Image (cartoon, helix red, strand yellow):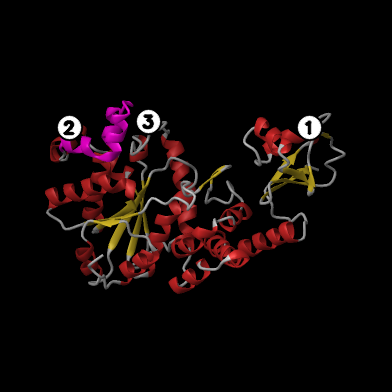
Amino acid sequence: MTYQPKSDFLREIIARGFLADCTDLQGLDETLLKGPVTCYIGYDATAKSLHVGHLLNIMLLRWWQKTGNRPITLMGGGTTKVGDPSFRADERPLLTPDQIDANIAGMQRVFDRYLGYDASVTGAVMLNNAEWLDGLNYLDFLRDIGRHFSVNRMLSFESVKSRLDREQSLSFLEFNYMILQAYDFLELYRREGCVLQMGGSDQWGNIVNGIDLTRRVLDAQIFGLTTPLLTTSDGRKMGKSQGGAIWLDGDMLSPYEFWQFWRNTTDADVGRFLKLYTELPVAECDRLGALQGAEINEGKIILANAVTTLLHGAEAAQAAEATAREVFEKGGMGDDLPTLTLTAAEIGEGISIAQLITRSGLAASGKEAKRLIAEGGARMNDEGLTDAGLMLTTADLAQPIKLSAGKKRHALVVLQD
């Protein structure tokens, strides 16, 4: 990079590895030096919670606010009704307005942990694009906005091309998504003086569309900035695990499981993840990431504690670490493990150990649970399991039992009183 930014925000995020591309780095830097600037990131309300895949850009917004700027979290109450086709093989299922509203409420609880929403100059704002999209007149919109879009150019975007190259259907509904997202940027500039949209690299085409539209309609100078699409050092998509998405809602994934996800970070990713997902000084992140052998575990625990503290609070992080130490170092139970609670009626005359392993989330299916047992990877109360047909009764579950899959994944099974 030849240009060396002077603004606190750009210097911080570049040092930490957040920057993939920017439409005009110098122009954005000069704008930031003049005072508080407003930016936004859009989030479609497709699930009840955000997940770890969203956390990189949430941290980006947090740095934006910490360096004296104003963030907007734009909830896609309108665009969720269409569905972003970017790099998807099929059309998203359509949600009802009530489902969308419930999802937005769940996502807001997560944002509240990272951003300060208030009426100050740098206070975060949450907006919903349904405010302006729901009331659009179709013919007026086509005439005033649609004329600025070239279908030839839209077809050239990688997110669309990849779908068409595989001969997978792209509905007209989905094709409209990029026009609606571009219109969001125009509206946010008009309403809030927002001059920057940020997002993942897969949103580059949508961001550039919004910049072009706003320049054409209002002759305004606005910017786009993207973050890299992260994979772990072993090539997996960041935020995916054997059990599915790593949710940021404590009701969907316990603080212990969240802590454990970060504790299990691959050695080669520790320094990079510390810089992206914590607020530790960059030099300290580099020092911890350079540790070798058993010492790297210090960095992993610091990473897990720092990330969990931001989301769930220091108390939850400390409890998760204490539970982990008890489970792994002392072979004890711990009182904060993911827990499967069963009633006597569910157990009936008996329930198989393979069922328990599956229902506790340690295996995706009964077949996988049986294979885990056959390969010697399953344990009950730290004793190896060999019989996939083992049946447990209510008497066996009078005391909680600990199930383990491999060395790092555990769950409790308890009988409801």
Percent of width and height locating residue 7 = 28, 71
Q: Amino acid at mark 3?
A: Glu
In the picture of the structure, the residue carrying the numbered disc 3 is 91
Q: Is residue 330 above or below residue 416?
A: below
In the image: residue 353, left or right of residue 116: right
Task: Look at the image and give the residue range highlighted in magenta.
Answer: 150-176
Q: Amino acid at mark 1?
A: Ile
Does the residue at mark 3 contact the one at mark 1 (Cβ under 8 Å)? no
Could you tell me what secondary structure mostly forms the magenta stretch?
Answer: helix
Percent of width and height locating residue 105 = 47, 47
Residue 140 can be seen, yes or no: no
**Label 3, label 1: how many angstroms apart (C-alpha)?**
40 Å
Q: For mark 2, does the 10 Å Cα neighbourhood hold few (<14), some (14 to 19), or many (20 or more) residues?
A: few
**Label 1, label 2: how many angstroms apart (C-alpha)?**
62 Å
Q: Quadrant of residue 22?
A: bottom left
Looking at the rendered image, the quarter that the C terminus falls into is: top right
Query: Callout 1: helix, strand or loop?
Result: strand
Q: Which mark is residue 228?
A: none
Q: Is residue 36 above or below residue 216?
A: below
Instruction: Name which of mark 3 and mark 2 comes first in the sequence.
Output: 3
Q: Any magenta on residue 167?
A: yes
Instruction: Name which of mark 1 and mark 2 comes first in the sequence.
Output: 2
Q: Residue at x 71, y 38 (%)?
A: 375
In the picture of the structure, the residue carrying the numbered disc 1 is 351
Query: Callout 3: helix, strand or loop?
Result: loop
Residue 124 can be seen, yes or no: yes
The residue furthest right is 395
**Label 3, label 2: how many angstroms apart (C-alpha)?**
25 Å
Query: Callout 2: helix, strand or loop?
Result: helix
Q: Amino acid at mark 2?
A: Leu
Q: Which mark is residue 139?
A: 2
